[in-house]
Image: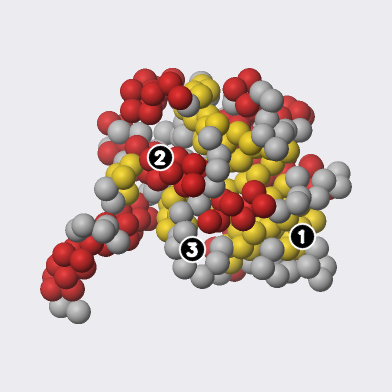
Amino acid sequence: MSVVAIVPAAGLGTRLRPLSDAIPKEMLPVGRALALERIVAELHAAGVERIVFVVSPQKEAFLRKHFGESFGYALQPEMRGLGDAILQARALASGASRLLVALGDAVFEEPELGGLTRRVLATDSPISIAVQQVPRERLSKYGVVAPKAGTEGSTFRIQDIVEKPAPDQAPSDFAVTARYVLPDTLFETLEKTPPAKNGEVQLTDALQLLLRAGVPGSAVPLLPGETRHDIGGFETYFKAFVTFAMNDPEYGAALRTYLKETLQL
């Protein structure tokens, strides 16, 4: 099957200001590689070659200069949500039978590069979503999947998805985690998806429509040793940078020694 990866990277990065006023957050270094470089390496390791970045007009030149013309660049002129961002890539994803959506502000620490993405691609469901277990008190920050009865396991079937539920109303503790494989019919569904109260078109709402219409879906949990790192805010960005820097093959050992001495561990 033909797969096109769509990497939404148009966000304003408001939680990283003033840093993100000068550099797109997706182009910040995470260890010795830029965040988007790590995502591109992950996608290539999973066998995905066609990649479309969805960017704001202000970011387009920045990314084109760095990555060149072997990638697609779709513009999102207004920040109208993740669903709208994906919709802007429709023309450049022409001919794809499956869409791999990889959020541009999340990188993965994993024993095998691209391992999670390969597993998400390998399910036999039209909808395949990476998930991670999250403490219930934090579920209101995520989309949360509802497993089908009797199918919860290493990879399990899902019957529904809910955006940012109250902890006591969440259908499970499995939160959506930045990697999706979706059918090409998603574009038509996004066009029909009503905007949320804030005017944004949400991907979760479109997925809910597909799942409730009977389109099969699977959830692929992170395995031990696989960790999502968000780079959208300073606390999580700092943790991501330090984690990858400590694992650097050339300088990681020296950095770990320095941190132990500094923290008197």
Residue under circle 1? 157
Residue 106 position within the rendered picture, expressed as x and y whole percent measured from the top left? 46, 48
Question: Which secondary structure, mark 1?
Answer: strand
Q: CA distance from mark 1 to mark 3?
A: 21 Å
Residue under circle 2? 36
Q: Residue at x 80, y 63 (%)?
A: 148
Residue flagged by tag 2: what amino acid is it?
A: Leu
Viewer-proximal residue, 155 or 27? 155
Q: Is residue 16 left or right of residue 149?
A: left
Residue 171 position within the rendered picture, expressed as x and y whole percent measured from the top left? 72, 63
Viewer-proximal residue, 207 or 97? 97
Residue flagged by tag 1: what amino acid is it?
A: Arg
Question: Which secondary structure, mark 3?
Answer: loop
Residue 262: assigned label: none
Tag 3 or tag 2, which sits nearer the N-term?
2
Q: Is residue 200 left or right of residue 262?
A: right
Tag 3 or tag 1, which sits nearer the N-term?
1
| Residues packed near mark 2 inside 10 Å, few (<14), some (14 to 19) or many (20 plus) | many
Residue 239 position within the rendered picture, expressed as x and y whole percent measured from the top left? 33, 59
Q: Is residue 45 above or below residue 88?
A: below
Quarter of the rendering occupied by the C terminus? bottom left
Tag 1 or tag 2, which sits nearer the N-term?
2
Q: CA distance from mark 2 to mark 1?
A: 30 Å
Q: Is residue 78 left or right of residue 188?
A: left
Viewer-proximal residue, 138 or 203? 203
Residue under circle 3? 226
Q: Residue at x 39, y 23 (%)?
A: 68
Q: Is residue 193 left or right of residue 55?
A: right
Viewer-proximal residue, 49 or 159? 49
Q: Residue furthest right?
A: 214
Q: Is residue 69 above or below residue 162?
A: above
